[in-house]
Amino acid sequence: MAGRTAVRLAALSGCLFTAACERIVEVEIPAPPEPRLVVEGRIELVKEAPSGMQTIRLRTTDAFFSNRPTPPAVGAGVTVTDGAGGVYPFVETEPGHYVTNDLQARIGETYPLSIDYEGDRYAASASLTPVAPIDSLYFIFEGETLVNDTAGYRAAIDYTDPPGGPDFYLWEQFVDGVNEPPPSSGNQFNLVSRDDLYDGQPVIGFEPNNEVVIEPGAHVMIRQVSLSRRGYDYYYALFEQNGLGTGNSFSVPPATIRGNVANTTRPEQYPFGFFGAAEVSVADGTGPER
């Protein structure tokens, strides 16, 4: 049974509480495939607080039935360059986390990514697109309805979509520092968006996470992130498939959603994840008393 694992399962044969009625079933499970690299990274320009600090996270896939955290990809060589000839090595500050403090992102710039990991080279490229600023963040009280099963305050924002599009958006909502998108299907309709129906128009009272009730005194931060068309398609599929139920915007999907990173050494051993570049607008507030 080379390359396969036999799993013995106990099944009941139509009776209960009797050892003699137990039947053993052997199921052959294919051996786990070679781990794949998972790339989670975005070069960001935050409107409200520009910074040279950028982070790229690298992990590997794990066995299908594993319930441990996905293993970090340690010891990789990670580099991002820009159109002006700048080369920015990322230093591994903790297992799987690669950081630089020197990359001041610019709108319109294209950023090629290069990763050397366990004998393979990976490559991707992303252009930094602008985003509309968040005009205000506030809280709307909603009673219990057929849609919302819990009464309480929801976080809402106002912004004006720039004319001319197409523009694509991703929203991240942090409550007391935790990214909390609800783990339900259909999140692709409110956590990512394209401006087909509201190009150039003001957007009022938009609730990115309208299933999340904001408790009094909770600190809320909403990040409005620009996406490329390819980034929009990737995140739409990711939300549609698993609702980002781990609360992580770069959650590893349970099936093969292909990103934009390629293995240039062994193309058939392609990685997962996505590398992007975006302008980001940030607004925050404190949950009101009920």
Image: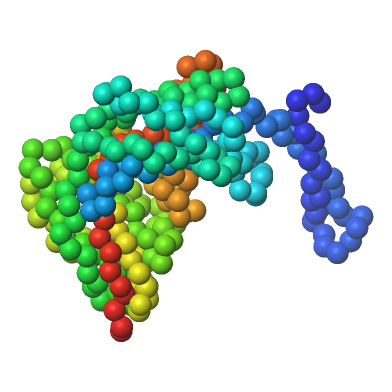
> Considering depth in this image, is 259 or 286 the residue closer to the camera?
286
> Considering depth in this image, is 83 or 245 the residue closer to the camera?
83
Residue 106 shown left or right of residue 93 in the figure? left
User: Seen from this angle, which residue lies furthest top?
Assistant: 265
> Considering depth in this image, is 213 or 262 the residue closer to the camera?
262
The residue at 41%/58% (across/down) is 179
Q: Quadrant of the N terminus?
A: top right
- Residue 214, quarter of the rendered image: bottom left
How many numbered markers are drawn? 0
- Residue 278, quarter of the rendered image: top left
- Residue 113, quarter of the rendered image: top left
One can see residue 34 in this view: yes
One can see residue 208 in this view: no
Rendered location of residue 38, percent (x, y): 51, 35
Residue 70 shown left or right of residue 23 in the figure? left
Rendered location of residue 82, percent (x, y): 30, 26
Q: Quadrant of the C terminus?
A: bottom left
The residue at 60%/24% (across/down) is 118
User: Seen from this angle, which residue lies furthest bottom?
Assistant: 290
> Considering depth in this image, is 41 or 227 the residue closer to the camera?
41
Rendered location of residue 115, percent (x, y): 48, 26
Rendered location of residue 209, percent (x, y): 32, 61
Q: As displayed, is residue 93 above or below residue 75?
A: below
Q: As displayed, is residue 98 above or below residue 248?
A: above
Residue 34 shown left or right of residue 211 in the figure? right
The residue at 29%/79% (across/down) is 288
